Amino acid sequence: MQHLDHDRLVFLALGESEADNGESTHLDTCVHCRVEMESLQQVAGLGAETQGLADLPDPPEHVWQGITAEIRAAEGLPSLAETRRQQAAEPVSGTADEPAGPGAAGQRARSRSRRRARWSGWAATAVTAVAAAAVGVVGTVSVLRQDDPEPAPTQAVVASAPLAAFGSTPKSAQGDARVLQSGQLHLRVANLPRVSGYYEVWLINPTNMEMFSIGTLGGDSDALLPLPPNVDLKSYTVVDVSAEQYDNNTRHSGDSLLRGTLTG
């Protein structure tokens, strides 16, 4: 039986084209091609899930500390060159000081066994260190990607506001804003529509619609922005996220995506 071409299976798995009647029949009857197709679809699905993932976060500090400790412990072991020199210097037969016999042979065997054990321990240490680094990175990514849990702020929350889609923004867009005791605004957003420019964060006085910019989000979904000193949060209660263009205009574009009112 002639199997489907691998490149063709890749296109089908990516959804670039649909299988014709002959290909569908072949996939139904050929276990080899069907398994390969399912594997490619799984890989394509994993790739799609990571499209929103930017640069990988740094591993936790304790991972690097563990690696450093393991390496320093391993540095106390003899080097490979030293071990080889010791092995080469060992007598292979009895001498005047060391008579040949089962006792001498057993002693040399025990010595070699101890060296092998030391090197096995060093190898295990190296593997453990590398594995710890890998687990640290994967664990960090997993923590950050599990429904994007919010990092616990170290300061008390002074005021907060849920952010909802504004105007013609898709209803799936949302977020929340928290004013921290340190004088910073912790902002989290999700499902913002793509824009050709950038996202900017504002505080608005709903009484007279005066406003000022706090900062920009760029492509981030989680940001910590400094608030101006002595900001009047009793007057400027509305948090606004707008879509802005690279037009050298510092004023609000009028295109608000999210809005919410701060409450204490």
Image: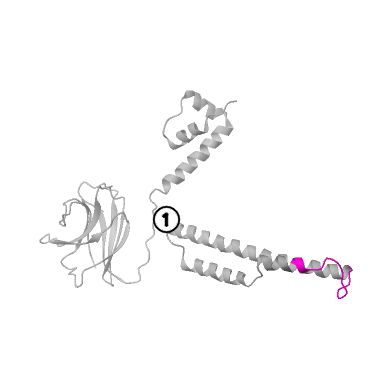
For the N terminus, give its image quadrant.
top right
| Residue corresponding to mark 1 | 145
Q: Is residue 94 magenta?
A: yes
- Tell me what residue is drawn at x 17 percent, y 68 percent: 234
Residue placed farthest to the bottom in the image?
Answer: 97
Prevailing SS of the magenta stretch: loop
Nearest the viewer among 126 and 76 is 76
Left or right relative to 43: residue 247: left
Q: Which colouring convention does the figure follow?
A: one colour
Q: Quadrant of residue 94?
A: bottom right
Side of 95 where 145 appears, left or right: left
Q: Position of residue 197 (x, y in %)?
A: 24, 50
| Residue 106, position as x, y percentages in the image | 84, 68
Residue 255 lies, with reference to residue 95, above or below; the image says: above
Observer-nearest residue: 86 or 203?
Answer: 86
Residue at image coords 42%, 45%: 48
Quadrant including the C terminus: bottom left
Spot occupied by residue 165 in the image (x, y as percentages of width and height): 24, 51
In which quarter of the view is residue 240 placed?
bottom left
What segment carries the magenta color? 87-101
In terms of image quadrants, where is residue 71? Answer: bottom right
Above or below, 54 against 20 in this view is below
Q: Nearer the viewer, residue 74 or 81?
A: 81
User: Most extreme residue toward the top, as rendered?
Assistant: 22
Find out whether residue 45 is within the magenta segment: no
Q: Is residue 21 above or below residue 31?
A: above
Say what secondary structure mark 1 lies in: helix
Q: What x and y, as percent, mark residue 225?
A: 27, 64
